[in-house]
Amino acid sequence: MQLLHVLYDIYLKTGIPHLDYRYVIMWLIGCLFMYLAIKKDFEPLLLVPIGFSIFLVNMPIAPLTGPGQLINLFFKYGLETEIVPCVIFLGIGALTDFGPMIANPKTLLLGAAAQLGVYVAFFGSIFFGFTIKEAASIGIIGGADGPTTIYLASALAPHMMGMVAVAAYSYMSMVPLIQPPIMKLLTSEAERKIRMKQLRPVSKIEKIIFPLVATVVICLLTPDAAPLIGLLMIGNLFRECRVVDRLLKTAQNDLLNIVTIVLGLAVGSTMKAEVFLSPKPLFIFFLGLVAFAFSTAGGVVLAKIMNLFLKEKINPLIGSAGVSAVPMAARVSQKVGQEADPKNFLLMHAMGPNVAGVIGTAVAAGAFLAMLK
Amino acid sequence: MVREALVVAGTGLLIVFLALIILSLSVKFMSFVIKSTTKKGGK
């Protein structure tokens, strides 16, 4: 009899009696993320840790996300302090060649136009009943920049960070599916065939001075974007000055990989059944898609408008690369361009608006912070 | 709230365009200065 009591006590201390259908749904969602990453190769570096973290934190009564517990510490010190998104920007800067943008600075305008979706979704979110701070965190998904989305959400709507981060990374991984139909809808066959003049070579000194110029301009105009832009630019300076190889390699590899693991686990940990299984995430995913579509359209349409005034026409397909999913959005421009003309090489031209989009989204986040914090 | 949202969205978009236009002009100016002060554009 006493043995039965002991066994029953042990049973109560397992997760089994606490298990309900909501946890199982979350396990399936976690598995879906891992499936997309492993089988479909959608942003595997992020979706694998996010997916497993969703799986893990939805184990009933597991000591993971409570105060002072392991995953909670990742979240607290990595995301709440905004360290992780900024350090990821350091890595992105170390990996990014701003040369195509320096060679053709007007592509910066395409990076600005591709933020249109941010504001359309922001406005749409208000109509869905979100508060103005929550709306800003949802709108920024349209910038297609995961670290910036997390940076803004952690400051304005920390309770929604997981949902918006997952929506942002999901749509970023789906760039090759979402963008082409919009690009084709908004351009004619003749426009898609426009060939652009080869970019001029950019000197080493221009590449070294650019991070300083960009830091001054952006930090003076939107000081709230300074943590993101500052680390993006110092990472880029490591890359271009060519005298700090060890720092560069660390920023590009080890450091970036470490913070990516922390980011994935921390973001996934916010997707607990009790928070996620409500209508809100569905609205957020829908509005994120709206944001993404309008951002793509914004870049393409501005490129078409610019063509009315430019002597040397630009291929409007590079406008869609203004969303900052680097370099996937640029590759999509290249691919859609080559469907119209197999000998047309748009990749380097599209990298200009693509990296401009990273700066544009950081500025958009800085502007929201300045107005709403 | 809609009015406030409209102001935030309008101002935000304006700031983004303004910042990137100024950055674009600054980059153009930087390239011009480097080209005109160094041999072969500072290569």
Image (cartoon, coloured by chain):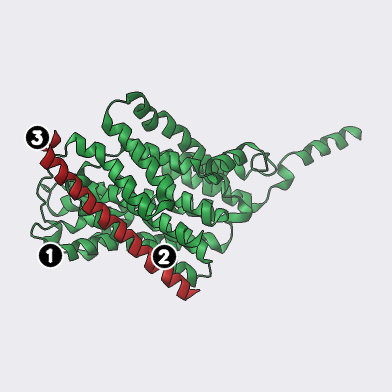
Chain colours: A green, B red
Pointer 1 local density, CA inside 10 Å: few below 14, some 14–19, many at least 20: few
Amino acid at dot 3: Lys
Identify the residue at horizontal 17%, vertical 52% (top origin): A337
Identify the residue at horizontal 26%, vertical 33% (top origin): A240
Q: Is residue A362 above or below residue A241?
A: below
Mark 2 vs mark 3: same chain? no
Using the image as rendered, state which of residue A359 and residue A331 is in the foreground. Answer: A359
Q: Is residue A111 above or below residue A287?
A: above
Q: What residue sits right under mark 2 in the picture? A: A121
Report whether A217 appears left or right of A1. Answer: left
Q: What residue sits right under mark 1 in the picture? A: A309
Q: Position of residue B39 (x, y in %)?
A: 9, 34
Amino acid at dot 1: Phe
The answer to whether the residues at label 1 and label 2 have Cβ atoms under 8 Å apart is no
Identify the residue at horizontal 16%, vertical 41% (top origin): B34
Looking at the rendered structure, the secondary structure element under dot 2 is helix
Pointer 3 local density, CA inside 10 Å: few below 14, some 14–19, many at least 20: few
